[in-house]
Amino acid sequence: MEYAYLYFHAALKDFISPAGQNQVIVRAVDRKPSIKDVIESCNVPHTEIDLIIVNGVFVDFDYIAQNGDQVHVYPDCSTVTHESDRPLCHLSPPIPVPPRFIVDVNLGRLARYMRLLGFDCLYRNDYDDQSIAEISCKTQRIVLTWDRKLLKRKIITYGYFVRTDNPKAQVRETLRRFNLYTSFAPLTRCTHCNEKLISAEKPAITHRLKPLTRQYYNKFLICPGCNRIYWQGSHSMRIERLIEAFCRQPMR
Ligand SMILES: [Zn+2]
């Protein structure tokens, strides 16, 4: 039998069982698999990886694993001590600007919160994995999911495996992972259907307003997708405080 020896670093250890996190993982490579397949057999999706170093040399996902390979795998944003004079060979491409997302069916509240912050975030509770992968590939949307199998699909370039099951913590994870702190546009997008809100003239919508709203507010936005009306005050203090908390960049 022929074997490769894998070492996962930093946040990639999240994918390894606690008992194995600081140990070498051994994989058979008799069939000459690509390093992508070897790494993903350890349950680490390629979308989480930025650097692969085999026997001291940077390689990409197509590298064919060889007997005796010592493989070090690093996530995006990791700090690698680099002694070779070769440049670092980053595998994660730059995130598209502006960043846009597609969220899998289990993360509806994450999608709503991201829309609240102004991010273009596609979500439908009847999307299947194939549709999500194809939309992500065609439109360069970042897949947010807790389905590792989905992220292993080769056509997905941009993705993030959400670690926690708490929706607010999921937002904070996503903001941190993609460094989105300068990209907020709160209360500019419909949280129900993801359309960008446009301004509405008060006379055109006045018949749809409740008496107190009609009396006290003059600036309105409307969703061209679902026709919902928004105005300053239509979000509770609780929501505004939540947005403020999301926008605060954590200390490093
Ligand atoms: Zn809408």
Image (cartoon, rainbow, N blue to C red):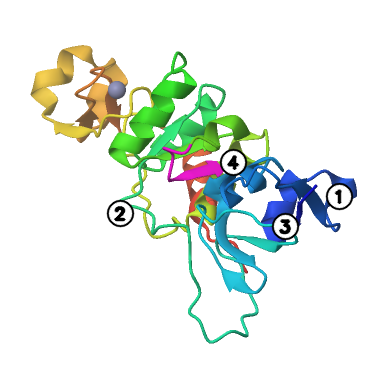
How far separated are the C-alphas under marks 2 and 1?
37 Å
CB under 8 Å between discs 3 and 1: no
Quarter of the image where one finds residue 203 = top left
Per the model, the C-alpha gap separating discs 2 and 4 is 20 Å
Q: Position of residue 24 (x, y in %)?
A: 83, 57
Q: What residue type is labelled 4?
A: Phe
x, y (%) of residue 140? 33, 42
Q: Which residue shows up at 68% across the image and 39% down it?
A: 164
Q: Quadrant of residue 198?
A: top left
Of mark 1 and mark 4, the one earlier in the sequence is: 1
- Does the magenta-highlighted stretch encompass residue 3? no
Q: Is residue 90 above or below residue 184?
A: below
Ligand 1 falls in quadrant: top left
Please rate how many residues cluster around mark 3, counting C-alpha atoms within 10 Å: few if below 14, some from 14 to 19, many from 20.
some
Tell me the distance, in whole angstroms, between the alpha carbons under discs 3 and 1: 21 Å
In the rendered image, which residue does mark 3 sit on? Answer: 67
Q: Which residue is drawn at 36% across and 29% down?
A: 134
Residue sitting at x 61%, y 34%: 148
Q: Mark 1 points at which residue?
A: 20
Q: Give the range drawn in magenta.
A: 154-160
Q: Earlier in the sequence, mark 3 or mark 1?
A: 1
Mark 2 Cα shell of 10 Å, populated few (<14), some (14-19), many (≥20): few
Query: Mark 2 or mark 1: which comes first in sequence?
Result: 1
Residue found at the very far right of the displayed protein: 19
Q: Which mark is residue 161?
A: 4
Residue matched to label 2: 97
Q: Earlier in the sequence, mark 2 or mark 4?
A: 2
Q: Are marks 3 and 2 in contact (CB under 8 Å)?
A: no
Q: Which mark is residue 142?
A: none
Q: Would you place residue 25 above or below residue 129 in this image?
A: below
Amino acid type of the residue tagged 3 in the rendering: Asn
